[in-house]
Amino acid sequence: MAAGKGTRMKSRLPKVLHRLAGRALLQHVVDTAAGLNARRVVVITGHGAAEVEAGVVHPGGGLLQFVRQEPQLGTGHAVQQAVPALPDDGMVVVLSGDVPLTHTDTLRVLIEACGGDKLALLTIAFDDPTGYGRIVRDGAGAVQAIVEHKDACEAQRQIREVYSGIMAAPARLLKPWLGQLNNRNAQGEYYLTDVVKLAVAQGVPVVGHRISDALQVAGVNSPVQLAELERAYQQRVARGLMEQGVRLADPARFDLRGELRCGQDVEIDVNCIFAGEVELGEGVRIGAHCFISNARIAAGAVIHAYTHIEGGISAKDRIEVGAGALIGPYARLRPGARLGDEVHIGNFVEIKASTLARGAKANHLAYIGDSKVGERVNYGAGSITANYDGANKHTTVIEADVHIGSNCVLIAPVTIGAGGTVGGGSTITKDTAPGVLTVARATQVSLSNWKRPEKKK
Ligand code: UD1
Ligand code: CA
């Protein structure tokens, strides 16, 4: 269900597209559903339908089915819209697009409890159940009904066990129940929760599967709740990493917006953000305030503080940092940077779509784009590759053991031959031969008979 408005977010963006850990709330739910190997994932949209439909994907590349609910007349009415999309021999699991952190395993247990012939409800007990639908049980403990907070009497409001918003039911039973719902209640809505009474009347067993982990059923209604859930999620991720042996300087100042795999003895200082798929090899150290996305950093590399490593998702945009490399502080690696072992990249150096072979160094204030840099090259401070002529990008090749002096401009396409040296301040427009010194700048002159201008009296 993702048709609701989410008024309390006070945002133009539909609520279910707000991000938690870098992914839309609804995407978390779709990913969880796909994780159950669901035959179909059906998303019910309404408010901002087109935007919502464009904002989620099936993680396995499969098809998402969208059905629209216009207008929004309640959760029962929402699921009614999905009826044509649900095969009769299937099991239906109802999820909310704004409840992002339910574990697939929890849903598996719920489906097992449903067993193909029962109605199974995911429930939880809250100290303050205000606002939730209460689970009403008879003397023997059998579930009789869900009564919405606004419809509940004082005695029912004392019940602490509530409906999480998640249920599993066989489609062949659920469909006729949906057809029998009415909106005669305090909110004038078609309540999905009324199917419980219908099941009981029909003699279909209703099982309540109660969990205690509130995070798994927590919904997002406001920016405050979103931030709270984000932090709770991050603390949990941080704890999991530390349990694997990763040393986080402060688990409260750690953010993962994707997946992070770490070898042994990885150390991560405060305020780092990891996005997409990141792999840190054995003994890698990450300094404070780094941003790292879609990158593989090999064993023993050190990423100093304030470094941005901004790999992209496609294979050509991913970033590789070789074993023992030293990067930063304040370095910027852009999509397609591939650095070999022992490469050194210093402060204010930007590398884009370039390969640097083992032992190459660019330690200060430099730009290397669309380039192939050989082993042991030393690339001087302030030097840049002019890779873009205003229309097309061109390649710079710097062969092994070249020294590029300070403040050089290498105008691509150009090749600097192996072992060559380029004198500081040179603008290089033509290929250079191996082993030679190339200087391309105005010759220095000194005039002794020159006088500074003086102010007229
Ligand atoms: C619902 C349950 C309540 C439960 C609570 C848990 C009903 C009647 N009540 O209440 O028992 O304790 O969730 O959070 O189901 N939606 C639509 N179309 C609609 C109405 C809602 O798609 O017409 C979607 C919303 O966007 C949301 C979800 O359904 O994702 C739940 O709706 P919401 O209004 O939050 O239900 P609650 O009143 O919280
Ligand atoms: Ca809700």
Image (cartoon, rainbow, N blue to C red):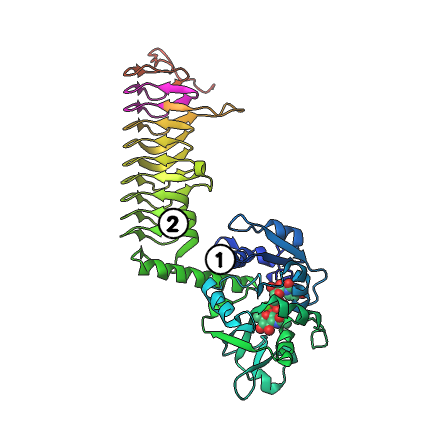
Q: Is residue 124 above or below residue 330?
A: below
Q: Position of residue 215 (x, y in %)?
A: 47, 67
In-image side of 176 versus 445 (left or right): right
Three-letter code for the amino acid on which mark 1 is drawn: Gly
Name the element at disc 2. loop
Q: Which residues are magenta?
A: 398-426
Whichever of labels 2 and 1 marks the residue nearer the N terminus, that label is 1
311 or 331: nearer the viewer: 311
Q: Of the residues tagged 2 and 1, which is closer to the observer?
A: 1
In-image side of 93 versus 185 (left or right): left
* 419 in the magenta segment: yes
Name the element at disc 1. helix
- Residue 35's mark? 1
Three-letter code for the amino acid on which mark 2 is drawn: His
* Mark-to-mark CA distance, 2 and 1: 33 Å
354 or 101: nearer the viewer: 101
Residue at figure coordinates x 49%, y 53% from the top left: 22
Q: How many labels were placed on the picture?
A: 2
Residue at figure coordinates x 57%, y 51% from the top left: 56
- Circle 2 Cα neighbour tier, 10 Å, few/some/many (<14 / 14–19 / ≥20): many
Q: Position of residue 202 (x, y in %)?
A: 64, 79
Outermost residue, bottom direction? 139
Reading the image, the residue beneath label 2 is: 289
Q: Position of residue 10 (x, y in %)?
A: 62, 60
* 291 in the magenta segment: no
Q: Position of residue 147 (x, y in %)?
A: 62, 79
